[in-house]
């Protein structure tokens, strides 16, 4: 694991909220920036996983209403479409071109909404899915490569079933990752998965050719 010390924190005003995000910058590599998202989990949950990608710029953020990102509209709930709009504005603010996106749990729902609405923004997209009715036709026609993933130890769980269901509708097969739904965690929130093996698998998926 690489220890990353060049981390900066930024704030981005979007309609109805002020988002807080962190950038672990590495301009030496040629790979796209890697954006790690969850929901309702915020940036703190990706500290361990980000450390395994010190060779590229890594971005994490707190979704609106979570931890450091505060709502300004007074609303009690947020739709996947609103989260997707937040993410599109955050990616645009990075001004780094298309990005790679890893999305876990509810973040995967938001990522599907993002791909359906803004496929020019992403290079590749790794998403395990839970509750959401994705726009399958929009996802099929998007230029973005969408890869569904499921944890090896989460068979039968909601996220695992969701990943397989969405993959079936897209005509693909989910990729299996080490561990369960918390496979990338390295002690965050009191949970430890298999982060090193998880990071190796993520690198393989991101580097795989489309098709």
Image (spheres, rainbow, N blue to C red):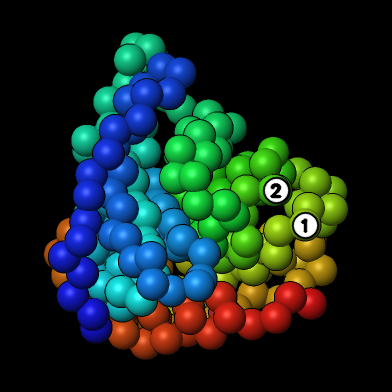
Q: Which residue is rendered at x = 49% and y = 45% of the image?
A: 95
Q: Earlier in the sequence, mark 1 or mark 2?
A: 2
> On the rendered structure, is 9 left or right of 89?
left
Element at label 1: loop
Q: In the picture, which quadrant includes the N terminus?
A: bottom left
Within 10 Å of disc 2 (Cα), the crowding (few <14, some 14-19, many 20+) is many
Residue 144 placement (x, y as % from top left): 71, 58
In which image quadrant can residue 51 be found? Answer: bottom left
Residue denoted by label 2: 119
Residue denoted by label 1: 143
In which image quadrant can residue 26 be found? Answer: bottom left
Q: Which residue is rendered at x = 46% and y = 27% of the image?
A: 78
The answer to whether residue 117 of the structure is visible from this angle is: yes
Q: CA distance from mark 1 to mark 2?
A: 6 Å
| Residue located farthest toward the front when viewing the structure as drawn | 28
| Residue located farthest toward the top when viewing the structure as drawn | 74
Residue 156 placement (x, y as % from top left): 52, 71
């Amino acid at each position: 694991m690489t220890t990353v010390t060049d981390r900066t924190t930024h704030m981005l005003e979007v309609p109805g909220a002020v988002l807080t995000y962190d950038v672990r910058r590495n301009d030496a590599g040629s790979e796209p920036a890697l954006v790690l998202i969850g929901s309702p989990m915020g940036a703190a949950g990706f500290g361990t996983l980000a450390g395994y990608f010190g060779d590229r710029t890594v971005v994490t953020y707190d979704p609106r209403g979570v931890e450091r990102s505060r709502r300004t509209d007074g609303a009690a709930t947020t739709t996947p479409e609103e989260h997707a709009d937040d993410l599109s504005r955050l990616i645009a603010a990075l001004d780094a071109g298309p990005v790679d996106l890893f999305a876990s749990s509810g973040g995967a729902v938001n990522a599907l909404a993002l791909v359906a609405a803004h496929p020019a923004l992403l290079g590749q997209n790794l998403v395990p899915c839970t509750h959401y009715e994705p726009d399958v036709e929009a996802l099929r026609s998007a230029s973005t490569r969408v890869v569904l993933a499921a944890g090896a130890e989460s068979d039968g769980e909601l996220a695992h079933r969701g990943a397989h269901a969405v993959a079936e509708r897209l005509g693909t097969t989910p990729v299996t990752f080490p561990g369960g739904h918390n496979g990338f965690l390295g002690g965050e929130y009191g949970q430890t998965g298999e982060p090193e093996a998880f990071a190796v698998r993520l690198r393989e998926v991101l580097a795989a050719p489309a098709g």
